[in-house]
Amino acid sequence: MKKNLIKILLLFFISILIFLFQYYKVSQYLNLSYIKENQLYFQHYYHDNKFFTLALFFLIYILSTALSLPGATILTLGAGAFFGLFTGFILVSFASTIGATLAFLLSRFFLRDFVEKKFSSYLKSINEGIKKEGSLYLFSLRLIPLFPFFVINLVMGITSFSVVKYFFISQLGMLAGTFVYVNAGRQLASIDSLSAILSPQILASFVLLGFFPFLAKKIMKKIQDQLIYRPYKKPKIFDYNMIVLGGGSAGLVTAYISSAVKAKVALIEKNKMGGDCLNTGCVPSKAIIKSAKLAYQMKNADKYGLEIINPTIDFKKVMKRVHGVIQKIEPHDSTHRYEKLGVTCLQGQGRIISPWEVEVNGKILTTKNITIATGASPFIPPLPGIEHITPLTSENLWQLNDLPKKMIILGGGPIGCEMAQSFSRLGSEVIQIEMMDRIMGIEDKEVSLFVKEIFQKEGILVLTNHKAKAIKREEGKKILVAEFEGRDHFFEFDEILVAIGRKANVEGFGAKEMGIKIRDNKSIEANEYMQTNFPNIYVCGDVTGPFQLTHTAAHQAWYCAVNALFGAFKKFRVDYSVIPWATYTDPEVATVGLNEQRAKKEGISYDLTTYNIDDLDRAIADSENHGFIRVLTKPKTDKILGATIVGNHASDLLMEFISAMKHGFGLNKILGTIHSYPSMGEANKYVAGNWKKKQTSERVFSWLKKFHQRDIK
């Protein structure tokens, strides 16, 4: 309220100043002919009243610049004509910078809140760019005096750019232009028009001067690169255009794209082709989820009008099927397939020994580019006593031969939730322990609570706010000690699955020895082009993040391949604007873009529209009528900021929202699209319909009712 009052008073004051400027026709005094006609008078007045004249001129210049009033150029010339080069230059330099900074602050005060509310997503990306390159862009624009400075003040004011930096960079950048104009003012008598001040040659010089910082940056980057490469000798000829370390999703896609554009590629994998996704992650987990779901449906066949069947779970057969699924998909990622595509596949531990050399199996290979795609591994916490057992992880889980009678799942993320439900449905007594206050912490609270309720109904003991402290062995029993509300609690188990996160694989292939930069979270640092601090060494996938998802790894791989092979002509910045993810519990949970908790955390304004799937005809027919859709839109528009679906086939239903966000169509277009009946996909149309209803006020419906009843009894 107080801020709004200040805004009103300040606007009133500015309006008065502008009114006085117009009323007294001040602009008539700010033209070249008037200044020339009265030059001698002003000079005499200045001689007799130096301090007052300087102060008045300084104030007028500041006000003119701060309010973006016309006449700054004439005033600059006048400074040279009346005060001389040195005094005029100092006066204008500080007055113009102070005025520009005031205009910058006015823009921030009046417009920033509005712009953040209306265009938060755009402003966020702009601020990220400003943080990286803002100083350089501001300095370059200030060097070109023909660029409308009031636009710079207006635009920069709504960003997060520092006021202090803005002042000093502006002053430094405007020095050259200020000098030219003030110096021109000394020869005022010979100037017939403003265009006479800047000849084509001078204009060209200023433009070149504006590009100079970017050129300097390029040169500095080149020098920095040379310093990085200086300890190494670059080969004159190369064995390959690209060597890829790691045969998981990221590495395979990098190799695939590189070979598709006829580059010579080598792919080095120390373990199995296909990486985690094929061998220990996505594929086996989805296979066991399917078996567990079928077992659950058999036990609950009565809801389909069938006799209940209590299936005999032969866990060895279940695991045999899991490995059979892996074997069926294996050819897609096989050495045979990739060699047919032209990729040289090598089995062994690759080691980077220089920016252009990789050693494998005792042989040194030379390459123009390297892509690191070494993935990540399960994180095992240093719990006291854990060394006395063999904890299960997503890597060795698939080697189980017997179904654990009592199983603890440590972690409430996607892997922990999927496996907790699957092993419970297969017959294990499952306890899921999560240190935070809820499982699925990345999702909205409503989603977490819904899934937790499902788990509890299925017999899973979900314990949140429990911190694992130690593992003990007592009388042949394995016991987990967990702290809850300051007290230790003890849980017996046969097997414990540790699913509390994954750590990037940064050891064993020469990254640290080479000096490749590692982030504080122990992942490899990459810029927006997926380059490491060595420009020809790229990185993608779980080893760099920020999303440890198979499809994101493949997405990053495209940038690695294209930027490495064609970066001399055009480089592409990686785009994370539309990243979907899914947890394959039953019901599934699938999200793209923002959810409500993230929007609140980032201060992004949104409208929330929901639809409960228990109302959907197809879901009712399938006895899968549970779950919901939550869609976030930009306020008062149909632009989709994010969507979360909880329900049967949620990961498939999400595709429509992913496409909408990627290609820029909103809920109106989804509402206007014919969806097959009866299908789960209709849920997307119904949530769009709910959004549409909220856009029409009760007043309109009241008017429509009166319109239709005007001739009705």
Image: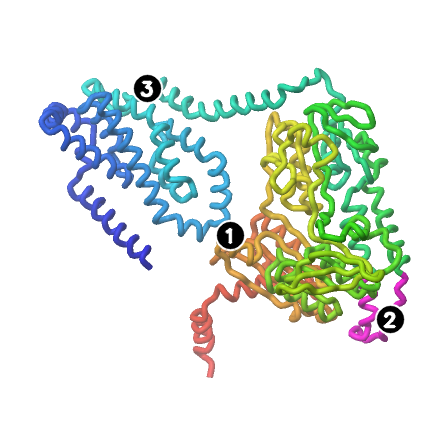
| Residue 589 image offset from top left, x and y in percent | 67, 59
Residue 584 visible somewhere in the drawing: no
Boundaries of the magenta span: 292-314
Instruction: Identify the mark nearer the N-term, 3 or 1.
Output: 3
Residue with the most extreme front position? 475
Asked which secondary structure carries label 3, the reply is: loop
> In this rendering, would 31 be left or right of 352?
left
Residue beneath the point at 78% across and 54% down: 285
Location of mark 3 (residue)? 199
Instruction: Identify the mark nearer the N-term, 3 or 2.
Output: 3
Location of mark 2 (residue)? 310
Q: Nearer the viewer, mark 3 or mark 2?
A: 2
- Residue 300 covered by magenta stretch: yes
Structural crowding at the residue carrying mark 1, measured as other residues with C-alpha within 10 Å and reported as few (<14), some (14–19) or many (≥20):
few
Color style of the picture:
rainbow
Instruction: Identify the mark nearer the N-term, 1 or 2.
Output: 2
| Residue 347 image offset from top left, x and y in percent | 83, 33
Asked which secondary structure carries label 2, the reply is: loop
Residue 654: quarter of image: bottom right
Q: Which of the pair 628/129 is nearer the observer? A: 129
Residue 436 visible somewhere in the drawing: yes
Structural crowding at the residue carrying mark 2, measured as other residues with C-alpha within 10 Å and reported as few (<14), some (14–19) or many (≥20):
few
Location of mark 1 (residue)? 602
Residue with the most extreme bottom position? 713
